[in-house]
Amino acid sequence: MTFPRSEGQIPIYYAQCSTGRPLTGGEHSERFVSKYIDESNEPLFKFGTGKSYAEFESHLLASERVDSFIEITYLVKNLSSIAAETVVHLYLHQEYASIVRPEKRLVGSQRIYLDKNEEKQFKLKIPISDLVIFNNKGEKLMEEGGYHFYLNIAGKESVARWNYTK
């Protein structure tokens, strides 16, 4: 669950569409951008942030097409002196689209367990059919172009880019 800083931020969710004028660097003097005057745009606690005695670090290593899937390879390290488990969330953002797309869309998740100070590679398979969108006529459409995958562990993100060509 995402927890807002104040009720003025409600509703907060990641599948919202871009305003086309995001706040870039936290400069409140910027005009005509989407921002709050008296607070941060970020929620108090992001989705996936939770209480844990362990700390994890993650890196996206590769994103490649394997048959009708996109295989995402990532590395996770348990930085703690205790064994622990966490949930990894994978979000998708399409760079350019013929219709408005959400900023981020949850396309996969995986629960992982690591021993103390263990480092391990994992893979997530996303069906390419999950990238299909519907145009204004209701027809299925798979658009060529760049896609960004965001790997999120406890509110910390790493990004990988993947290109789709027919």
Image (cartoon, rainbow, N blue to C red):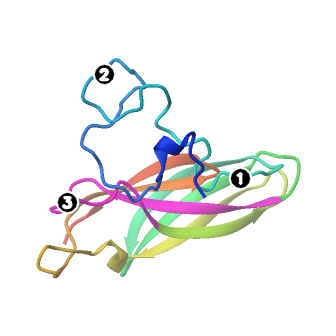
Q: How many marks?
A: 3
Outermost residue toward the top in this view: 29
Residue 101 image position (x, y, % from top left): 27, 60
Location of mark 3 (residue): 97
Range shown magenta: 84-106
Location of mark 1 (residue): 50
Name which residue lies at 60% across and 49% down: 3
Label 2 vs 3, first from the N-terminus = 2
User: In which quadrant will I find the N terminus?
Assistant: bottom right
Q: Secondary structure at mark 2?
A: loop
Name which residue lies at 62% across and 46% down: 45
Residue 40 image position (x, y, % from top left): 49, 32
Label 3 vs 1, first from the N-terminus = 1
**Given the image, on which type of amino acid does mark 2 rest?**
Glu
Q: Nearer the viewer, residue 103 or 39?
A: 39
Q: Is residue 83 left or right of residue 63?
A: right
Q: CA distance from mark 3 to mark 1?
A: 33 Å
Residue 73 in the magenta stretch? The answer is no
**Given the image, on which type of amino acid does mark 3 rest?**
Ala
